[in-house]
Amino acid sequence: MNELSGGPVQIALAKPRMVVCDVDGTLCDVRTIRHHVDPLLEGFSGKRDFGRFHSQSIDCPANAWVVELVRLLSVEGWAIGIVTAREERWSFLTTLWLAEHGVPYDQIHFRRNRDNRSGVLVKSDILASLSRTNAIGLAIDDNPGVVGLWQSSAIPTVVVSADGTPAKLGLCHHFAPGQEFPDVREFVRRFQMP
Ligand SMILES: [Mg+2]
């Protein structure tokens, strides 16, 4: 019972709406260092070197339109969940990079150290955890497998192309399949929770 009114205590049950956003290839433009971990790229040494990849990522630029999108969503009241398949041991470097590029966020989730599962499985676990207390209403990612995860969970998704530009829409409410990504402000204005 509420001490003041004598009536039942009111508890807000609505989950806060959250956008989940990836780091590598999404917020962070890693094209100049991807050859450290991608055997298909010129300059690959013969062994995937995540240590070199992540340590050099601190000097990578941001995809400015993704940062702007996250900032605008934050201003509009969305909770920002940074969801990355980087191991926890890169958390300091990652949060430093996010701060240097002015990326706001409410939560950040990493892969556990020495968890060698695929990024899709790691993010699937994070999604299950986040969904208990948040309404995941939008995702931003560049990895086709992870985009498939968000899609299979009915989460509208902004896809970042391999060249760092926005892919055509089709996974988002209020946009026709294959529609060009509009201006970031226009996207946020038109995008609504289902
Ligand atoms: Mg990525």
Image (cartoon, rainbow, N blue to C red):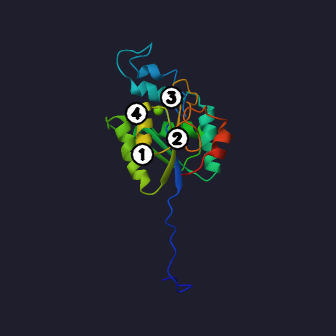
| Mark 2 Cα shell of 10 Å, populated few (<14), some (14-19), many (≥20) | some
- Badge 3 marks a residue whose secondary structure is helix
Residue 142 x %, y %:
49, 32
Residue 118 x %, y %:
34, 34
Q: State the mark number for residue 95.
A: 2
Sequence order check, earlier mark of 3 and 1: 3
Residue 169 x %, y %:
56, 35
Residue 169 visible here: yes
Q: Does the residue labelled 4 lie within 8 Å of ligand 1?
A: no
- The residue nearer to you, when weighing 186 against 108, is 186
Sequence order check, earlier mark of 2 and 4: 2
Residue 97 x %, y %:
55, 36
Q: State the mark number for residue 57.
A: 3
| Residue 47 in which image quadrant | top left
- Badge 4 marks a residue whose secondary structure is helix
Q: Do the residues labelled 3 and 4 touch (CB within 8 Å)?
A: no
Q: Are marks 2 and 4 in contact (CB under 8 Å)?
A: no
Mark in front: 4 vs 1: 1
Q: Do the residues labelled 2 and 1 touch (CB within 8 Å)?
A: no
State the separation of the CA atoms marked 3 and 1.
Answer: 30 Å
Sequence order check, earlier mark of 4 and 1: 4
Residue 102 visible here: no
State the separation of the CA atoms marked 2 and 1.
Answer: 27 Å
Mark in front: 3 vs 1: 1
- Badge 2 marks a residue whose secondary structure is helix
Identify the residue at horizontal 49%, vertical 66% (top origin).
13
Q: Is residue 47 above or below residue 172?
A: above
Name the residue tied to disc 4: 145
